[in-house]
């Protein structure tokens, strides 16, 4: 029987959540209490915020209303 993966946070002994507990930014595996980037103090938090900001900016720019003059 395979061992259950434990939370990557040093002081936590809880079982890590499958899929939703995997952090794409630091590669850790976290329980339901520590799965969010802010909760496990992820080293990639700033990169995540920057990436989300850039995606939002591109989406807003794409959806920008164009004014057609002379119609």
Image (cartoon, rainbow, N blue to C red):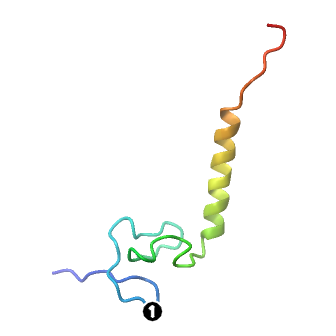
- Crowdedness near tag 1: few (<14), some (14–19) or many (≥20) residues, C-alpha within 10 Å: few
Residue at left offset 78%, top offset 20%:
67
- Among the 4 quarters of the image, the one containing residue 60: top right
Furthest-right residue in view? 70
Residue 58 sits in quarter:
top right
Residue at disc 1, secondary structure? loop
60 to 33, vertically: above or below: above
Q: Residue furthest top?
A: 71
Looking at the image, the residue that sits furthest to the front is 33
Q: Is residue 10 above or below residue 51?
A: below
Residue 46 at x, y = what percent? 66, 68
Q: In this rendered view, identify the residue nearer to me: 52 or 26.
A: 52
Using residue 70 as the reference point, say whether residue 23 is left or right of it. Answer: left
Rendering quarter of residue 50: bottom right
Q: Residue at x 69, y 45 (%)?
A: 57
Could you tell me which quadrant the C terminus lies in? top right
Residue 10 x/y as whole percent:
46, 90
| The N terminus lies in quadrant | bottom left
Badge 1 is on which residue?
Answer: 11
Q: Position of residue 16 (x, y in %)?
A: 35, 77
Q: Is residue 24 left or right of residue 14?
A: right
């Amino acid at each position: 029987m395979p061992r259950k993966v434990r939370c990557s946070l040093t002081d936590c002994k809880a079982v890590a959540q499958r899929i939703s507990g995997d952090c794409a930014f630091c590669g850790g595996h976290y329980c339901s209490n520590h799965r969010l980037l802010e909760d496990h103090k992820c080293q990639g938090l700033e990169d995540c915020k920057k990436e989300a900001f850039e995606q939002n900016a591109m989406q807003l720019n794409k959806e920008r209303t164009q004014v057609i003059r002379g119609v």
